[in-house]
Image (cartoon, rainbow, N blue to C red):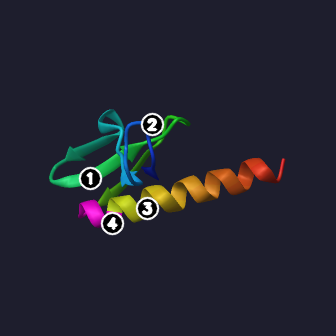
Amino acid sequence: MLGMRARDSAPEMHFRSDRVCRINGELFFSTRENTLEGPFESAVQIEKEIQAYIARMQGQNSSR
């Protein structure tokens, strides 16, 4: 995720390494909702899909 930590001088991309895994050469990410999303072929693709997933989930929460 793109964000700033207290010790960062500029926003950076941070990943929770325990949420991204590689199975048979393909990338997947797990969610708080206990789903496994994927497969994705590259780090660039999975980064975009994680951001899209977060946006979808935030949109669902704001409509409640």
> Closer to the camera, 15 or 24?
15
Residue that mark 3 sits on: 49
Label 3 CA crowd tier, 10 Å (few <14, some 14–19, many 20+): some
Disc 1 marks which amino acid? Leu
Q: Is residue 54 left or right of residue 7?
A: right
Residue that mark 2 sits on: 6
Residue that mark 4 sits on: 45
Disc 4 marks which amino acid? Gln
Instruction: Residue 29: give x, y in percent of width and height.
Output: 37, 46
Q: Verify CB contact (< 8 Å) between mark 2 and mark 4.
A: no
Residue at 71% x, 57% y is 59
Nearer-N-terminus badge (1/3): 1
> Closer to the camera, 15 or 41?
15
Task: Write down the region rendered in magenta.
Answer: 41-45
Task: Examine the image and state in which quarter residue 8 appears.
Answer: top left
Instruction: Residue 39: give x, y in percent of width and height.
Output: 32, 57
Nearer-N-terminus badge (2/3): 2
Mark 3 lies on a secondary structure that is helix
Spot the residue most to the front: 9
Residue that mark 1 sits on: 27
Label 4 CA crowd tier, 10 Å (few <14, some 14–19, many 20+): few
